[in-house]
Image (cartoon, grey):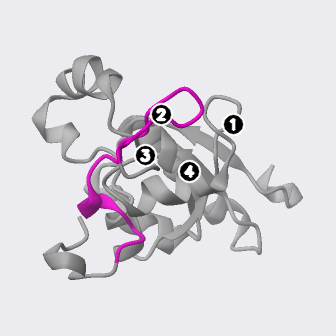
Amino acid sequence: MDALGFQCHFHALGDRAVRDALDAIEAARAANGRSDTRAHLAHLQVVHPADMPRFARLGATATIQPLRAAHEPQMDEPTIPFLGSERAAWHYPFGALPRSGATLAAGSDGPASSPGPPEAIHVAVNPRGPGADGAPVRRRTWWCWTATRSPFRPRGSRGRAWR
């Protein structure tokens, strides 16, 4: 696909999927040379820290869905315990990716989540869901993973550093 000039889009949730996708992009670049195509890796639920600088080096875009990273019971109960402490630290590294040089793009992942940009932007920036009281948004409450992981908060904002 790369040799034909197609822009490839990978759905990569876990660290192994992210690494495999980056390996495929690297192999395509080695075989075909650099071009103006911009491969995208979407979701990026878990990214190994060693793979973060590869996004910039390979010209791959990290396509994030902030609402998917909302802190809610399904995150606390099955996800975090399944990941374990080491991988949980790599969970939704939306602040670390741009610090490593990655280009970010954002989307809604609709219809699996709300297609509304305001909700996604709000969750990406704030530690709480839209509405001062964290009220439900389209029948669901969105809670941010942590404000320190947000790529959209400036360094030192309210004493917090990006993750």
Magenta-colored stretch includes residue 130: no
> For mark 2, what is the residue?
136
Mark linked to residue 19? 3
Please state which of residues 49 and 67 is positioned toward the viewer in this rendering.
67
The tag earlier along the polypeptide, 1 or 2, is: 1
Q: Which of marks 3 and 2 is in front?
A: 2
Residue 70 appears in which quarter of the rendering? top left
Label 1 Cα neighbours within 10 Å, binned few <14 / some 14-19 / many ≥20: few
Identity of the amino acid at label 1? Gly
Q: Nearer the viewer, mark 3 or mark 1?
A: 1
Q: State if disc 2 and disc 1 touch (CB < 8 Å).
A: no
Q: State if disc 4 and disc 1 touch (CB < 8 Å).
A: no
Q: Distance between the residues labelled 3 and 2?
A: 35 Å
Q: What stretch is highlighted in magenta?
A: 133-153
Q: Where is residue 98 in the image (x, y as percent from the top left)?
A: 41, 72
Q: Distance between the residues labelled 2 and 4?
A: 11 Å
Magenta-colored stretch includes residue 136: yes
Residue at position x 22%, y 28% in the image: 80
> For mark 4, what is the residue?
119
On the question of residue 144 being in view, the answer is yes
Q: Nearer the viewer, mark 2 or mark 4?
A: 2
Residue at position x 51%, y 52% in the image: 22
Please state which of residues 153 and 133 is positioned toward the viewer in this rendering.
133
Q: Position of residue 149 (x, y in %)?
A: 29, 59
Q: Nearer the viewer, mark 1 or mark 4?
A: 4
Q: In this view, does 80 lie to the left or right of 11?
A: left
The tag earlier along the polypeptide, 1 or 4, is: 1
Residue at position x 25%, y 70% in the image: 162
The tag earlier along the polypeptide, 2 or 4, is: 4
Identity of the amino acid at label 3? Arg
Identity of the amino acid at label 2? Pro
